[in-house]
């Protein structure tokens, strides 16, 4: 009996370690993808673009935007390794480049405004005149912009195991569903949260995003050997 317990001890510790790593990676994947998609910051643009539209049409545009975001990010997640090999891009290079993009977006979010890398004033004005702006520019680049795509690419860049991919795809799915709910209820959320509440949320996400950008920088420099591993 004691021998059996001794054999089960290391196996139990290994299982707990795997579970801990999975939870940690899942939280990282969900937070980085969600903060970069940032549907709350898209509320003012969505309301401006869909002004004059009836409830059914706004619901369709919210659904198209969320579905486009899911398809785009999932495509880059599944094709990430192929893209790295095709263009000869190394993971450290992409981590540093992705960290730079995240830093620019995060700084803009700290000022409670949408980054030009996610949308521009011209795109919003043009979209308000379109019959259906659900795919472009709402789905891409307002939700699935360069920052979100870069984050997904970095997450899949290190030869992920199957459970890594499950966590990434689940995070994309959850983010798309929440984005649909936020955009579909944009008017109600704006009334409940108010402009001040939305700005506070955006600033909090921006602060966390800047920290995530710094971590991407550190990971890239560590993989290059510039910073020694602890």
Image: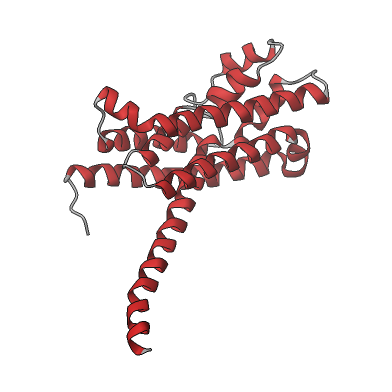
Tell me the quadrant of the picture where the C terminus can be found. Answer: bottom left
Is residue 36 positioned above or below 51 on the image?
Answer: below
Residue 150 visible in this rendered orientation of the protein: yes
Does residue 131 appear left or right of residue 163 in this picture? right
Residue at position x 31%, y 33% in the image:
94
Residue 207 visible in this rendered orientation of the protein: no
Q: Please provide percent x and percent y for residue 104.
A: 41, 33
Query: Viewer-proximal residue, 175 or 215?
Result: 175
Where is residue 156, by image quadrant? top left
Residue at position x 30%, y 42% in the image:
217
Does residue 32 appear left or right of residue 46 in this picture? left
Query: Viewer-proximal residue, 180 or 217?
Result: 180
Q: Residue furthest bottom?
A: 2
What kind of colouring is applied to the model shown? Answer: secondary structure
Does residue 60 appear left or right of residue 143 in this picture? right
Q: Please provide percent x and percent y for residue 141.
A: 53, 23
Is residue 33 positioned above or below 51 on the image?
Answer: below
Residue at position x 36%, y 44% in the image:
160
Where is residue 216, by image quadrant? top left
Q: Please provide percent x and percent y for residue 12.
A: 39, 73
Residue at position x 36%, y 83% in the image:
4
Query: Viewer-proximal residue, 109 or 51?
Result: 51
Where is residue 177, by image quadrant? top right
Q: Please provide percent x and percent y for residue 58.
A: 76, 24
Does residue 204 appear left or right of residue 151 in this picture? right
């Amino acid at each position: 009996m004691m021998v059996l317990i001794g054999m089960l001890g290391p196996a139990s510790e290994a299982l707990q370690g795997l579970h801990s790593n999975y939870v940690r990676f899942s939280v990282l994947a969900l937070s980085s993808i969600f903060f970069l998609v940032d549907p709350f910051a898209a509320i003012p643009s969505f309301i401006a673009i869909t002004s004059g539209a009836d409830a059914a049409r706004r619901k369709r545009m919210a659904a198209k935007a969320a579905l486009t975001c899911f398809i785009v990010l999932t495509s880059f997640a599944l094709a990430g390794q192929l893209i790295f090999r095709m263009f000869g891009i190394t993971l450290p290079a992409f981590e540093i480049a992705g960290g730079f993009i995240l830093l620019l977006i995060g700084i803009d979010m700290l000022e409670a405004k949408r980054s030009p890398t996610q949308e521009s004033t011209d795109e919003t004005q043009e979209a308000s005149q379109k019959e259906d702006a659900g795919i472009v520019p709402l789905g891409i680049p307002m939700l699935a912009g360069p920052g979100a795509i870069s984050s997904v690419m970095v997450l899949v860049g290190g030869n992920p195991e199957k459970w890594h991919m499950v966590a990434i795809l689940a995070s994309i799915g959850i983010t798309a569903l929440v984005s649909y709910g936020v955009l579909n209820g944009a008017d109600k959320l704006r009334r409940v949260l108010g402009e001040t509440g939305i700005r506070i949320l955006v600033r909090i996400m921006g602060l966390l995003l800047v920290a995530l950008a710094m971590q991407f920088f550190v990971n890239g420099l560590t993989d290059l050997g510039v910073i020694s591993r602890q």
